[in-house]
Image: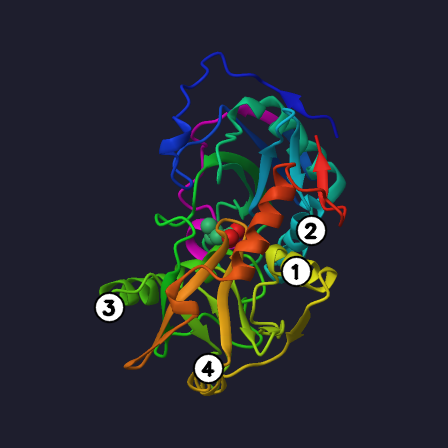
């Protein structure tokens, strides 16, 4: 399929790089294509960024048949533009699509569309430390119908946003609280899919912890309420007795691309990584025995977020004296260094545009 390109005649003013927050500003262009049952994907177009028309009856607005992805583009010191493992995002998008009964996308075609869009707006990629261009592909059901069934029409889009740190405090260690009332998902649910509903369902818990003076939630499993699953919108790692422990992908945990990259990187460094179930009681016991060296969360948006304090009932566990751990820093420096072309990409993760 050919991509039609309609360029904007009204280039927007860019925000100063030192004032960039996460996800507030958007570039000049966006990508859009339609799906119609019996025809497939069609009308792939890059067009000026702006509002879209939707019928109020569009199914996504009622039943949340939707999937999204998040990845980033970076500028190297030589002015080259590069992406980090974009094929992994598109593969995951198709797995999420399958779960949400959304038609598969052609991963090679979408990667080409994404590269074309990034190239067109590459002067939006910031290059101050800690910044990048966040790319948000997403797909949603557009049938004008309010019965509950699988939609027959969809829109797939890509929008892009120059971003600074995801959290206001940058890499400052976070205060996290163990959520024991709400659950993010259960086995057989949609926890493994990157669909908007998972995030909407987490908002009440997020609101609750912020009133207690914490920044994020640590989610436990939804059945036994004891196995550690994720932190906020990220995966989580604990360094216990020199072993990096991260919850195994059990069907309820988002298979993070940063998670996967951190595991591969640690193994490449000769470190031991144990993907297994870990309970909050086991973690607390290890904490009391002084065996937890570090804790951090991983995700595309925030990259690495050290966990300074973990609240659980009326207990507060502080890791690494509430400071950024050695490995949290080293992993961040290596990943962000590779992404921005300042560290050699020995693992072949970079895709140049
Ligand atoms: C990411 O880290 O990529 C995320 O999915 C967070 C996003 C919901 C802002």
Name the residue that disc number 1 marks.
260
| Residue positioned 53% across, 47% down in the render | 140
Name the spot of residue 187 as percent of width and height, x first. Answer: 56, 77
Question: Gap between marks 2 and 4, in whole Å?
Answer: 37 Å
**Crowdedness of circle 3 by 10 Å Cα count: few (<14), some, many (20+)?**
few
Residue appearing at x 38%, y 65% in the figure:
322
Question: Which residues are the magenta region?
Answer: 45-66
- Scheme of colours in the image: rainbow
Residue 180: give x, y in percent of width and height: 36, 79
Where's residue 173, x and y in %? 39, 59
Q: Are the residues flagged by discs 1 and 2 in contact, CB closer than 8 Å?
A: yes
The image quarter containing residue 101 is bottom right
Badge 2 local density, few (<14 within 10 Å), some, or many (20+)? some
Front: mark 3 or 4: 4
The disc, 2 or 4, on the residue closer to the chain's N-terminal end is 2
Regarding mark 2 in the picture, which secondary structure is present there? helix
Tell me, for residue 88, which label it has, or none. Answer: 2
Residue 27: x %, y % from top left: 48, 27
Marks 1/3: CA–CA distance? 32 Å
Image quadrant in which the N terminus is located: top right
Give yes or no for residue 62 being in the magenta stretch: yes
Q: Earlier in the sequence, mark 1 or mark 3?
A: 3
Q: Nearer the viewer, residue 157 or 337?
A: 337
Which of the marked residues, 3 or 4, is nearer the chain's N terminus? 3
Judge left or right: residue 269 versus residue 197: right
Horizontal placement of 217 versus 213: left or right?
A: right
Residue in the foreground of this view, choosing between 351 and 66? 351
Front residue of 207/151: it is 207
Magenta span contains residue 261: no
Q: Which residue is disc 3 drawn over?
A: 212
In the picture, the disc for residue 191 is none
Residue 290, label in figure: 4
């Amino acid at each position: 399929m050919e991509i039609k390109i309609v360029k904007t005649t009204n280039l927007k003013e860019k925000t100063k790089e030192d004032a960039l927050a996460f996800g507030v500003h958007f570039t000049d262009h966006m990508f859009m294509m339609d799906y119609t049952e019996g025809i497939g994907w069609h009308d792939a177009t890059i067009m000026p960024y702006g509002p879209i028309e939707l019928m109020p009856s569009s199914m996504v607005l009622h039943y949340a048949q939707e999937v999204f992805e998040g990845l980033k583009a970076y500028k190297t010191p030589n002015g080259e533009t590069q992406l980090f493992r974009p094929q992994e995002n598109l593969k995951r998008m198709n797995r999420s699509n399958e779960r949400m009964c959304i038609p598969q996308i052609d991963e090679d075609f979408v990667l080409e569309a994404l590269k074309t869009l990034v190239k067109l707006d590459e002067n939006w990629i910031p290059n101050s430390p800690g910044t990048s261009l966040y790319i948000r592909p997403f797909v949603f059901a557009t049938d004008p119908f309010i019965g509950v069934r699988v939609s027959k029409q969809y829109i797939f889009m890509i929008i892009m946003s120059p971003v600074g740190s995801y959290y206001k405090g940058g890499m400052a260690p976070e205060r996290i609280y163990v959520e024991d009332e709400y659950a993010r998902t259960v086995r057989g649910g949609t926890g493994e899919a990157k669909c908007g509903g998972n995030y909407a369902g987490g908002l009440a818990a997020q609101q609750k912890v912020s009133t207690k003076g914490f920044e994020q939630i640590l989610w436990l499993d939804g059945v036994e309420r004891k196995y550690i699953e994720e932190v906020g919108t990220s995966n989580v790692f604990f360094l216990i007795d020199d072993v990096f422990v991260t919850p195994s992908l059990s069907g309820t945990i988002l298979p993070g691309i940063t998670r996967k990259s951190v595991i591969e990187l640690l193994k490449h460094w000769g470190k031991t990584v144990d993907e297994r179930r870990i309970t909050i009681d086991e973690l607390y016991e290890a904490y009391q025995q002084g065996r937890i060296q570090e804790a951090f969360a991983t995700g595309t948006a925030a990259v690495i977020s050290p966990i300074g304090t973990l609240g659980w009932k009326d207990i507060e566990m502080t890791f690494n004296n509430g400071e950024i751990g050695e490995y949290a820093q080293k992993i961040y420096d290596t990943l962000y260094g590779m992404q921005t072309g300042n560290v050699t990409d020995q693992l072949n993760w970079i895709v140049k545009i």
